[in-house]
């Protein structure tokens, strides 16, 4: 292929690549793999006083509600780092509701 024909064929291909690159980069930047990690919570083992500690992380800062099978429940304030701690609660099954999300605690 002579030089003039190559330029006529390759120039439009180069232009398409330059136009498509920003669109491809924008799609990658908004991919779901950049999502916030899922919230988790757990209880400690039973302490000498018969109570447990409840803690968690990965939540959105602000209020959340604690539900417990042992009758304990109430609002907890999630810190700026996404974590919380509730000390000396009765042993049982716990879950945290924040917005429309319910997180089951392990332990």
Image (spheres, helix red, strand yellow):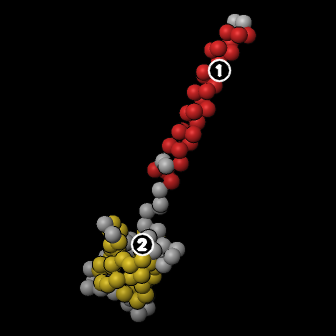
Tag count: 2
- CA gap between label 1 and label 2 equals 57 Å
Q: Residue furthest top?
A: 1
From the viewer's perspective, tell me whether residue 83 is left or right of residue 98.
right
Residue receiving disc 2: 41
Label 2: how many Cα within 10 Å (few below 14, some 14–19, many 20+): many
The quadrant of the picture occupied by the C terminus is bottom left
Viewer-nearest residue: 33 or 22: 22
Q: Position of residue 38 (x, y in %)?
A: 43, 62
Nearer the observer: mark 1 or 2; the answer is: 1
From the viewer's perspective, tell me whether residue 2 is left or right of residue 47.
right
Tell whether label 2 touches label 1 (CB within 8 Å). Answer: no
From the viewer's perspective, tell me whether residue 99 is left or right of residue 39.
left
Q: Residue furthest bottom?
A: 49
Q: Position of residue 40 (x, y in %)?
A: 43, 68
Residue receiving disc 1: 11
From the viewer's perspective, tell me whether residue 73 is left or right of residue 16.
left
Label 1: how many Cα within 10 Å (few below 14, some 14–19, many 20+): few
Q: Secondary structure at mark 1?
A: helix
**Residue in the image at 33% along x and 72% along y:** 97
Q: Position of residue 31 (x, y in %)?
A: 48, 48
Q: Position of residue 102 (x, y in %)?
A: 32, 68
**Residue in the image at 38% along x and 78% along y:** 63
60 versus 32 height, above or below: below
Viewer-nearest residue: 88 or 27: 27
The quadrant of the picture occupied by the N terminus is top right
Viewer-nearest residue: 68 or 75: 75
């Amino acid at each position: 292929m002579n030089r003039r024909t190559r330029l006529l064929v390759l120039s439009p291909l180069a232009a398409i690549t330059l136009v498509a690159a920003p669109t491809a980069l924008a799609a990658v930047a908004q991919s779901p793999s950049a999502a916030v990690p899922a919230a988790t919570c757990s209880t400690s083992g039973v302490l000498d006083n018969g109570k447990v500690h409840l803690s968690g992380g990965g939540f959105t800062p602000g209020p959340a509600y604690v539900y417990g099978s042992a009758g304990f429940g109430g609002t907890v304030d999630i810190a700026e780092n996404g974590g919380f701690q509730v000390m000396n609660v009765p042993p049982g099954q716990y879950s945290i509701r924040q917005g429309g999300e319910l997180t089951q605690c392990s332990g």
